[in-house]
Amino acid sequence: MVGPNFDKCDIAIVGGGLAGGLAALALAAKRPDLDIRLVEPGQVGGNHVWSFFDSDIAKKDRWLVAPLVRYHWPRYDVRFPAHDRTLDMGYKSITGEALAEAVAAALPDGHIIADRAKHVAPDHLLLARGGRLSAKHVIDARGGGKFPTLDCGWQKFVGQALTITGGHGIEQPVVMDATVEQLDGYRFVYLLPFDAETLFVEDTYYSDDAALDEPLVRERIAAYAAAQGWQVTTTMREESGVLPVVVAGDFNRLWPASDRTARIGARAGMFHATTGYSLPHAVRTAAALPALVGRADLPGRLRARAAASWHRQRYYRMLDAMLFRAADPEARYRIFERFYRLSPRLIARFYAGRSTTADRLRLLAGKPPVPVSRALAALARLDWR
C-alpha cells in the first residue's frame, strides 16, 4: 500500500511479468539514482518457464539474463514424421521464481507494491486498494490480452513439470516433437529435462482459435508420457498460455499515437510475430531503458522502437498468413518440417527475429509446403501495415 510519504517516484512499472521484471532489474542496476516501483498484484514472474536460444540475446545484453538462468543445454533436438535432427545451438531456461528473487533483491523494501492498477496514466496510477502513485514516468507492462485489433492465429499450450521415477532418458531439450497426432492445427510436444527424473512436458498447438481446453490437454500429456513408458509420480508445476501469432494488423490501432503512456512487452506489440515469444524483445527493451529514461519523451521513444520492430516483422506476418490461411490445419507441420532442414544459422536468425534478405529468399525457395494459389489469395486479403 502506498503511504503518505511514499506516493511519488521516478519510475512506476505496472506489471511484474517478464518485461516488467527485466525492466526493473535493468533500471536498478544501471540507474541506482532513480526511485523505481513495481506494481504487481500476484507473484513477480508468475508461474512461468521462459526459454531462449543463446543467439536470441546480443552479447552486450547477456548480463541481464545470465543471473536468471536455471537450466542450460549445449544443443537441442527436433522430431518430425520424415526426419529427426540435433542442432548444436545453446538453449537456456529461466523461471518465474528466479525473476522474482532477483527483483526482490534489486529493489528496496516496499518498492514492490502488491496491488492492481485500476487506472494507468502517463504520470500516475490509481491502485485498486486505494491510493495514487505519481511518477515522472509510468511504464505499462501488463501484457497484451487477446489483441482484438489484430488478425491472429494462436499458439496455445499446457506445460507440466513431471517427476518420472526411474528417469525419462531425455538428455537435451526437444523443441518440437511433431510425430504426435496432429490435432487442432499444428501440434507438437516440447520437452525440457530439468534433471534425470524431472521433465517439463508441454503440449502446444498452432490453432485458429484461442480456446484452450486445459483438462483435455492434460489428458494428452498423460497419454504422451504413458506412450513413452514413463512412470509419472508427481506433477510439480503447471503453466498454460495462449500467445498471438500475428497474421496482420495496424500498429496504430494496437498502440494509438494519442496514448501517451509508455509501454513495453506484449502490450507494445514487442513479440515475435510467428513464435509469439517475447523474451528477446523484453531483454532488448530493458537493456535500452536506463539510457532512454534520461531523455525527453520516453513514451514517444518507446513507441517509435515498437513501431520499428512491428514494421521489421512484416515478413514473419506474411509467413503466418501462409501458415494459417493457406495450409490445411493437419498439414501445417510440413512447414516446420521443411524449415528444420535449413541451415542452423538461418534457423537461429529466424528465432531472433533477424532474418537476412538471403534468409527470406531461402525460406520461400523451392517447392512450397502450401498450395501456391491459396498462399497468393491469403496474402492479397491482408493489411500489411
Image (tube, grey):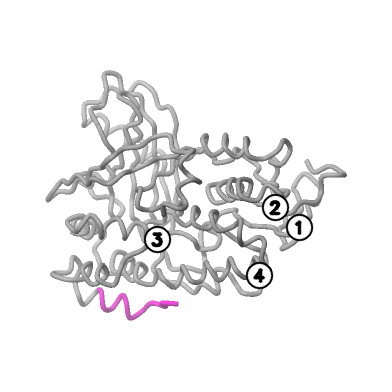
Percent x, y of residue 80:
18, 48
What crowding class fits label 2: few (fewer than 14 Cα within 10 Å), some (14-19), or many (20 or more)? many
Q: Secondary structure at mark 3?
A: strand
Q: Is residue 382 magenta?
A: yes
Mark number for residue 146? Answer: none
Q: Who comes first in sequence, dot 2 or dot 4? A: 2
The residue where tag 3 is placed is 245
Quarter of the image containing the N terminus? top right
The residue where tag 2 is placed is 12
Residue sitting at 44 percent across and 43 percent down? 240
Residue sitting at 39 percent across and 72 percent down? 314
Query: Distance of mark 3 from mark 2, alpha carbons?
Result: 29 Å
The residue where tag 1 is placed is 124
Looking at the picture, which amino acid does disc 2 mark? Answer: Ala
Looking at the picture, which amino acid does disc 1 mark? Answer: His
Q: Is residue 110 magenta?
A: no
**Left-right relation of 358 to 40:** left
Percent x, y of residue 166:
26, 18
Q: Who comes first in sequence, dot 4 or dot 1? A: 1
Q: Secondary structure at mark 4?
A: loop
Q: Are marks 3 and 2 in contact (CB under 8 Å)?
A: no
Q: Nearer the viewer, mark 3 or mark 2?
A: 2
Percent x, y of residue 29:
60, 46
Q: Are marks 2 and 1 in contact (CB under 8 Å)?
A: yes
The stretch of residues the image draws in magenta is: 375-385
Q: Is residue 145 visible?
A: no
Q: Nearer the viewer, mark 2 or mark 4?
A: 2
